[in-house]
Image (cartoon, grey):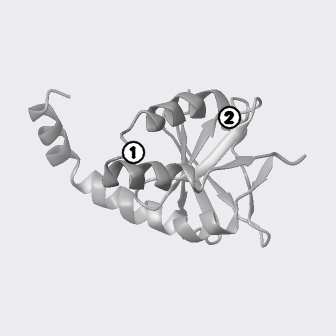
Amino acid sequence: MFLGEHTHSIDAKGRVAIPAKFRDKLTAGAIITRGLDNCLLIFAQHEWEPFAADLGKMSYAKANARAYIRHFTSGAAQVEFDAQGRVLVPEYLRTFARLKKEAVFIGLYDRIEVWDRESWERYRQKTEGAADEIAEKLSELDI
């Protein structure tokens, strides 16, 4: 299970160290891809497979389903760790997530989100300010 928030610097080559607490759960391989809200997602290999299988069950006849499938799968890349526990984030993914100098790793139970630090701060302030409203809307849905 991935939990917590960790910030790491991105070097000039686009490499960033995965937090050690997260890295321990990724020893069998990891996939990085586009997420929602202009962040990236990192999945352990064993978590990516059912996620991708669920995408494959969507109706390819529907334009929104095709777009959703493409969003996640076209940018997916297998990542490898170097001796320092760093991964090279492909340039197209760094551009998508607007990653600059610092990346914030957010543990989301079965996956990790990777945010540009400034983008994460803006998003977090916005959602924390609306937490009561979000909770109320979700309670209306019995969530």
Q: Please tell me whether mark 2 or mark 1 is closer to you in this view.
A: 1
Q: Which residue is mark 1?
A: 60
Seen at 90% across and 46% down, the residue is 83
Q: Quadrant of residue 7?
A: bottom right
Judge the density around disc 2: few (<14), some (14-19), many (≥20) Cα neighbours within 10 Å.
Answer: some
In the picture, which quadrant includes the N terminus?
Answer: top right
Judge the density around disc 1: few (<14), some (14-19), many (≥20) Cα neighbours within 10 Å.
Answer: few
Q: Indicate the amino acid at tag 1.
A: Tyr
Seen at 66% across and 36% down, the residue is 22
Q: Is residue 61 left or right of residue 34?
A: left
Q: Which residue is mark 2?
A: 21
Residue found at the very far front of the displayed protein: 61
Seen at 13% across and 32% down, the residue is 141
Identify whether 109 is placed above or below 114.
Answer: above
Residue 3 in sight in this render: no
Q: Secondary structure at mark 2?
A: helix
Seen at 59% across and 56% down, the residue is 75
Q: Indicate the amino acid at tag 2.
A: Lys
Q: Is residue 130 left or right of residue 46?
A: left
Residue placed most toward the observer, 113 or 9: 113
Total numbered circles? 2
Q: Quadrant of residue 124?
A: bottom left
Relative image position of residue 15 (x, y in whole percent): 76, 61
